[in-house]
Structures are given as structure tokens and as C-alpha cells.
Amino acid sequence: MNQDIQQSELIFYLPLVASYVVACFLAYVIFKKNKVWGIPSVFEPQKPWQELVFAFIAVLCIFILGRIYDAGFLVSSRYNSIAWIINNLIIYSPIFILVTLRKQPMVTLWISRKNLVLKVVTGFFCAFLGVFVFIALRGEIDRIGPILLKSISLDSIASFVAVFMEGVVVAFIFIRLKWVSNLKVALFVPGLLFALGHVPGMLAQSEPWWHIILMSIFTGFIAMFVLYTCNNIKDIVWLGIVHYFMDVAINAF
């Protein structure tokens, strides 16, 4: 399989945007038609700004744990895939610890067991269509088989936890931003963070400035569009599946 998928060209970014737009639109239609909108959070914090501060502290702890992992600590890598799963659960644990300590329901992360089967099925269906749109626009229909095989490999499946938790973190911050502001602000901040998140690594790799700008613009747009969809659906489960398969398609791991 061609490993040079994440190219510095529009042939990568435009199909990627199209795939997420199609997946999000389909998910919205399915959820609306079946009247499945998750469980909207009825939690009303008495001090929303305080909750936002706690949220950013939790995210800071995630970054610290990530750096500790990079330094070679946490669970030894000799356990391979199992270690990767456990380490990610440890790294992202501050979110669940905070939600538990603050006695906040899991729906404040857009996670619930309501209509779980339909959410999972929708996720797989949207993921398949999204991947198909991506490779079709790139003229790589022949990659569908290898992508599906890679998606069920143990090494790839082990990365699902990390991929899913990325979405949980964004939902976590988004919902708490809405508590203290409005939809536009709550969309803009995570979008900006996503846009800037890849910059340090790209600078370290001496990527050209135009590549950095393209990556920032398109990743920021995708983040805001996906968040807008999730805000209507009030669920993150389906997105975790879509995100996973799209990462397999672009050889993100």
C-alpha cells in the first residue's frame, strides 16, 4: 500500500474535507430520521467558569501525562498493543476523574448507552462511505481492500482508544465552553486548537509554510464542521468510528 498518503497538496485535503462532510451529513440524516439525538445534558453547573477552569486543568494533565509517556514511563512498550491501549487510558484518565469528582453525567461528554446499537451501526456506515469518497476522489478505489484489512489488524485496533479519546477531549472542552459562552465561541476555540495543533510538529520537520497553512485551514474547518454536527446529534460514539477508519485510510498510524 502507498504509505505517502498525507501529501502536501489539495489532492489530500479536498477529498478529506469531502469525506467528512458526506459522513457528517449522512449521520445527521440518520439520527434525525430515527429521532436519535442522544441524551441532551440537563446538567447545569452553578459555577460554569469554574468548570471550564477545571476542564483546562484536566487537559493540561493529559498533556503532562503524554510527555511522561514520551519520556519512556507508564506501561512498558514491550507489551505492544495492550500497552498502547493501557497507556492511552492512563493519559486521558483526567477527564473521567474530573467528571466523576464533579458528579457530572457522562452525557456531558456526549456519551450514553441510549440507542447504542444504532449509533455504532451509523458510525460504521458513515465511516465506509467517508472512506469510499476519500479514495474515490483520489482515484484509489483499489485501496478499499487493504484499508479494510488494516482496520481489523490488532495494531490498528489498538489505536482506536487514542482516536476515540481525541473526540472525547474535544467534546469535553466544547460543552464546557458552551456553558460560559455561545455556539460560535465553542466551535471556534477547538477549531483553532486543532488548526494549530499540528504546527509544532510540522515546523520540527521543516515543512514548507504553505503546507502548514493548508493543514491549519483544513483541519480547523473539519473540526468545526464535525463539532457542529455532533452538537446537533449530541453523540460522539459514531464519530469515533468514522475518525478511526479515516485515520486508517490516510495512514495516520
Image (tube, grey):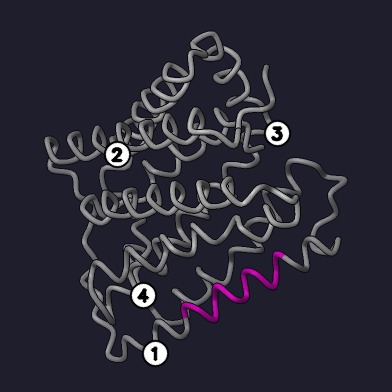
Q: Looking at the image, tell me whether mark 2 or mark 3 is earlier in sequence order.
A: 2
Amino acid tagged 1: Gln
Span highlighted in magenta in the image: 55-66
Q: Which residue is mark 4?
A: 104
Q: Looking at the image, tell me whether mark 2 or mark 1 is earlier in sequence order.
A: 2
Which of the 4 image quadrants contains residue 250? Answer: top right
Q: What residue is drawn where x is 60% and y is 15%? A: 146
- Mark 4 or mark 2, which is nearer to you? 2
Q: Quadrant of the N terminus?
A: top right
Q: CA distance from mark 1 to mark 4?
A: 14 Å
Number of the label disc, if any, that sits on residue 3 = none
* Viewer-side residue, 168 vs 39: 168
Q: Which residue is mark 1?
A: 50
Place of residue 164 in the rendered image (x, y in percent of width and height, measured from the top left): 50, 48
Q: Which residue is mark 3?
A: 155
Q: Are marks 1 and 3 in contact (CB under 8 Å)?
A: no
